[in-house]
């Protein structure tokens, strides 16, 4: 285990292989499961193709950090006169219409 954090109802860890595991009660990232999880179980909800490096927990919430990697920026090297919309293609981003 690399990191461990706790909330009122659950505990979380970032493992040596950069995955998140959780246990406790409530919604812990295992889909619709809200029962008590007594042993660490891998979080599989919304973590596709991500490697996690750190976590932060408060009494009621938790946050996990996953580095981003930019593979391409569009448009490339072209003159710009302002209001140019940039598109980033990479790893660790989520869809955002803005």
Image (cartoon, grey):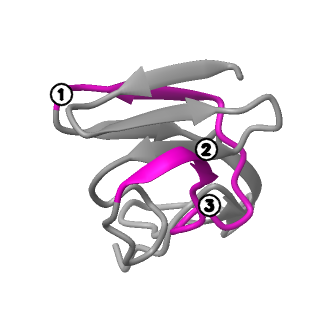
Tell me the residue that label 2 is attached to. Answer: 20
Left or right relative to 93: residue 56: left
Task: Mark 2 or mark 3: name the one nearer the start of the chain.
Answer: 2
Residue 77 position within the rendered picture, expressed as x and y whole percent measured from the top left: 74, 58
Tell me the residue that label 1 is attached to. Answer: 59
| Measured Cα–Cα span from mark 2 to mark 1 | 18 Å
Q: Secondary structure at mark 3?
A: loop
- Residue 51 within the segment the image draws in magenta: yes
Residue nearest the observer in this picture, 90 or 57: 57
Quadrant for residue 44, please give it: bottom right
- Which is more foreground, mark 2 or mark 3? 2
Query: What residue range appears in magenta?
Result: 36-59
Residue 56 position within the rendered picture, expressed as x and y whole percent measured from the top left: 39, 25
Tell whether label 1 touches label 2 (CB within 8 Å): no
Quadrant for residue 84, please give it: bottom left
Residue positioned 36% across, 65% down in the render: 83
Left or right relative to 62: residue 90: right
Residue 18 position within the rendered picture, expressed as x and y whole percent measured from the top left: 74, 38
Numbered circle sitting on residue 79: 3
Task: Mark 3 or mark 1: name the one nearer the start of the chain.
Answer: 1
């Amino acid at each position: 285990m690399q990191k461990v954090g706790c909330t009122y109802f659950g505990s979380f860890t970032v493992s040596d292989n950069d995955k998140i595991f959780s246990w406790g009660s409530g919604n812990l990232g295992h889909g619709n499961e809200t029962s008590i999880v007594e042993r660490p179980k891998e979080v599989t909800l919304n973590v596709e193709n991500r490697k996690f490096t750190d976590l932060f927990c408060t009494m009621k919430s938790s946050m996990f950090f996953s580095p981003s990697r930019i593979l391409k920026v569009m448009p490339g090297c072209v003159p710009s006169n302002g209001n140019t919309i940039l598109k980033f293609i990479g790893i660790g981003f989520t869809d955002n219409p803005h």
